[in-house]
Amino acid sequence: MSNKNAILLMLANGFAIAGMFIFITKSSFIYIEYFKVDINYFTLFFSLNIVSLITFSKFNISLLQKYSSFTIFKIGIIIQLISASILILFAPIHTLESVIIFIMLYVGALGFIFANAISLLLENFGHISATTNALNGVIGFIVSAFIGFLASLSHNDTLQPIFILMGITSIISLFIVFILLNKSNS
């Protein structure tokens, strides 16, 4: 893996993480303001995403017996894109339950994305693992900060801008994955 490919992988990971930060930024609006969930239940609904992330992470371990890290990384991004697409297409008619389920899938897919991105990066940069991890984190937070700002800026009291931004981050991640695939096949 070249330095350019490593940066592309970090960017793909960063945009996937940014989608989660959109949800974190807007979760109180989604649950408390939009769906009128009692404040006492907000933490329960929010914590379902952590359960989903842990579940995907555990499943990732099993999948690694059969599939490559890059394949699972790519599947995680595709799950995010499918979840975001469903959230976008049906935004006006979503119920609380459907939004919870598809956001759980979106956030949970990071259990496939996080670990496999780091694994792929460390395959070739293990000798500078601390620097590699730090750079990956910084890139993820820079992308997330910018996307989080856009999420706040685009607020219009509907779910549509939130879900569209989540979809855009997934599309960008998948586009970067296709660039990486194209580079590895040439």
Image: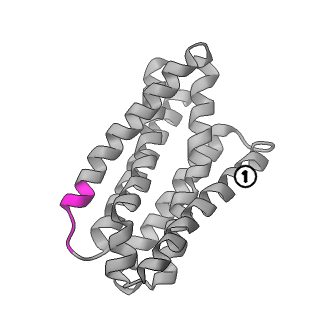
In the drawing, does residue 33 fall left or right of residue 107? left
Could you tell me residue 97's position as x and y percent? 51, 82
Could you tell me residue 44's position as x and y percent? 54, 73
In terms of image quadrants, where is residue 113? top right
Q: Residue at x 56, y 42 (%)?
A: 114
Q: Residue at x 50, y 80 (%)?
A: 98
Could you tell me residue 1's position as x and y percent? 55, 21
Q: Residue at x 39, y 49 (%)?
A: 18
In the drawing, does residue 174 fall left or right of residue 76? left
Q: Relative to the observer, which residue lies in front, 36 or 7?
A: 36
Note whether 71 is above or below 158 in the view shown.
Answer: above
Q: Is residue 1 visible?
A: no
Q: Is residue 40 visible?
A: yes
Q: Could you say whether the residue bearing mark 1 is in a helix, strand or loop? A: helix
How many numbered dots are placed on residues in this image? 1
Q: Residue at x 37, y 39 (%)?
A: 141
Note whether 44 is above or below 11 in the view shown.
Answer: below
Q: How is the image coloured?
A: one colour
Span colored in magenta: 150-156
Could you tell me residue 74's position as x and y percent? 57, 46
Note whether 61 is above or below 35 in the view shown.
Answer: above
The answer to if 152 sits in the magenta stretch is: yes
The answer to if 20 sits in the magenta stretch is: no
Amino acid at dot 1 = Lys
Give the farthest residue toward the top: 127
Q: Relative to the observer, which residue lies in front, 155 or 183?
A: 155
Q: Estimate how packed mark 1 is, as few (under 14), some (14 to 19) or many (20 or more) residues with alpha carbons within 10 Å.
A: few
| Residue highlighted by disc 1 | 58
Q: Relative to the observer, which residue lies in front, 178 or 81?
A: 81
